[in-house]
Image (cartoon, rainbow, N blue to C red):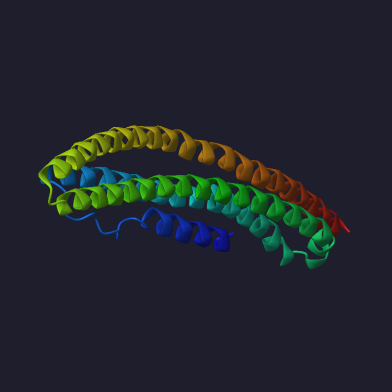
Amino acid sequence: MKFIIASVMCLCLSLSLASVGQAQPVSLPAPLDAQLLNVVDEMTQIGENAGKALVHQYEEIVMEPQQQLDQAVERVEVRRSESPQCVAEQDAQIDSILDTAHQELHECGLTAAHDSAEIVTDVNQATQQLVFGGYALGRTYNKCQNYKNVVLKQSCMAKFYVQATLYLVSARSSLKTIKQTTNDRIPAVFTDSNACTHVASEKAVTALDVINADIDKCIGQARRR
């Protein structure tokens, strides 16, 4: 479980921060450059927030049920000092319960890790598209500036501003969509995976509590002999 958490954490942070260090296109008109920076910064922030939220809730999804299971095992193990024989009689059943629980928790964790990685990957890809779109604008603008012929330069700049307008409209639409999607998908991962791990843990805890009751009976019978 710790390995899965660490893997998701590394993936979330590396993907969500992947675009932070990207250099911005040079030689853009100041107003457009400011808008472009704002779009990329906003998208990067969405990625960072998504990564942090997923890591935080993933730890809750996995660690709380695991702690509940560990506490149930401890309640059984403390009885071993009272009657090693009574507890030993239940060892095979305890091992079976724990094997099943760990397998189910592992599967729940893998699903959460997969879904979390998909969300962050989608955000990262959208961020990269925005960054590359900004690069394309920069290249077009530089090409226009290199024209010596005034007519060609004006024609090129007209196309550039059309391209820039379309890019910013598309970027804002992408930001809105990613925000809505992320806001829906992150809670869904928590709800589904949290239910999965807690059901697995609760089943095991209930079974271990039954075993603990059987140990009580065994100890009681031994004392009456």
Locate residue 135, reporting x and y percent: 29, 52
The residue lying at 83 percent from left, 60 percent from top is 92
The residue lying at 36 percent from left, 36 percent from top is 174
In the figure, 86 relative to 174: above or below? below
The residue lying at 30 percent from left, 58 percent from top is 22
In the figure, 23 relative to 168: above or below? below
The residue lying at 80 percent from left, 56 percent from top is 96
Considering depth in this image, is 50 or 91 the residue closer to the camera? 50
Locate residue 183, reporting x and y percent: 41, 35
Residue 223 location, quadrant:
bottom right
Assign the N terminus to one quadrant of the image. bottom right
Locate residue 65, reporting x and y percent: 59, 49
In the figure, 201 relative to 14: above or below? above
How many marks on residues? Answer: 0
> Left or right: where does residue 68 sit relative to residue 121?
right
Residue 13 location, quadrant:
bottom left
Locate residue 81, reporting x and y percent: 71, 67
> Left or right: where does residue 104 sit relative to residue 175?
right
Residue 197 location, quadrant:
top right
> Left or right: where does residue 67 sit relative to residue 81?
left
Considering depth in this image, is 67 or 44 the residue closer to the camera? 44
